[in-house]
Amino acid sequence: MKILLALLIFSFMVIFHELGHFLLAKFNGITVTEFSLGMGPRILSTVKGGTRYSWKLLPFGGSCMMLGEDMDDEGEGTFGSKSVWARISVIAAGPIFNFILAYVLSVFIIGSIGYDQPVVLNVYEGYPAAEAGLQPGDTITKINGKRIHLYREISNYSLFHQKELAAGNPVTVEYVHEGEKRTARMVPADNGSGRYILGISGHQNYRTKATALDVLKYSAYEVCFWIDSTVESLKLLFQGGVELNDVSGPVGVVNIIGETYEESRSDGAFYVWLNMVNMAIMLTANLGVMNLLPIPALDGGRLVFLILEAIRRKRVDPETEAKIHFAGLMALMVLMVVVMFNDVRKIFL
């Protein structure tokens, strides 16, 4: 069951991502030669309107193949025949559609169960927050100038900034107490396990029902939360703050989806559905961010070359660009194999 759920979620995300490329390509008059779900040999295929629509054997990834995409070809309907800004819009559309999908799914989540207000539920004696005067019921609005909209953002700030907190850097917290805006500066304290905290707690499942306007607004905050979480996680990865065991690939994600499904079953089908949608929001936002990284073969890598072309007003040699993208693709495949092997190893540990 967990494999089926994972395939459905992955497939939905990939189709929506490639749909972004497809629609913008069609809008700009670029011929799409093939639109496919999966990789490898074709299982099913049909041709309509000059485009081959395919379902392929390996249930990972997908593609929107455009005429002359990696060639120095400016014939009618080719990718290279369009303006640089048209090509930028086509490449950027994939990740943007991932964020749009995350927003639509967030509307469902927020509309169903509300949002987690950044309200303090507990203040622990002997810790900086209590000494600064924070009390249960206070609403956190900013931490070190960063706007806070959801309680999970408070938890994430502590998670992703442990190095600064451990260094004794003061944290400026802006909050609302009984309608009055207040500001407190405090130095995080060690909780005895090497983790530096302010000494407050809340609960991400403590939800506030949303009005129609709140649903639209907090759905945007939800997407921003997951984008920010992905970016901060990548920063930790590059800074050496994340080990290989903390990184999950497709196999690891399938396992997480399965565990979430099993834990949700006792709560009923509705909560299983909510948790699967929440997983899809996290994954599609993650996919959008990862595709925007300036790595060859990814959308972000292609955007780098297009932006260079816009600045130079001259296209980078397509053959050279294709070689760089191919090298990037090979490197990504090696990384995927390493992560997948590690995922399998963790399952059997």
Image: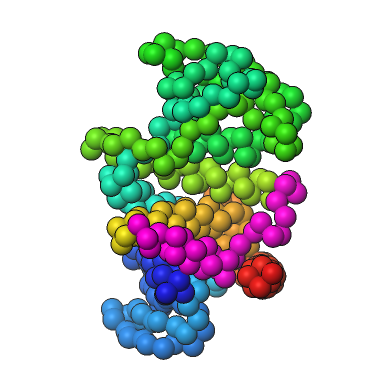
Q: Number of callouts in the render?
A: 0
Of helix, strand and loop, which mostly describes the magenta segment?
Answer: helix
* Residue 324 position in % (x across, y down): 67, 67
Q: How was the colour assigned to the protein in this rendering? A: rainbow
Residue at figure coordinates x 33%, y 35% from the top left: 208
Whole-percent x and y of residue 187? 68, 21
Q: Position of residue 276 (x, y in %)?
A: 39, 60
> Does 118 lie within the magenta span?
no
Q: Quadrant of the C terminus?
A: bottom right
Magenta run includes residue 257:
yes
Residue placed at 58% from the left, 46% from the top?
231
Residue 303 against residue 205 in the figure, above or below = below
Quadrant the N terminus occupies: bottom left
The answer to which image quadrant residue 32 occupies is bottom left
Question: In the figure, 170 relative to 27: above or below?
Answer: above
Q: Is residue 130 left or right of residue 195?
A: left
Q: Is residue 47 visible?
A: yes
Q: Is residue 343 above or below residue 247?
A: below
Q: Position of residue 163 (x, y in %)?
A: 73, 35
| Residue at 35% from the left image edge and 42% from the top image edge | 219
In the rendered view, does 160 fall on the left or right side of 258? right
Q: Nearer the viewer, residue 130 or 48?
A: 130
Residue range (magenta): 239-267
Is 187 positioned to the left or the right of 103 in the image? Answer: right
* Residue that lies at the very extreme toward the left in this rendered image: 212
Task: Give the quarter of the image for residue 113.
Answer: top left
Q: Nearer the viewer, residue 220 or 196?
A: 196
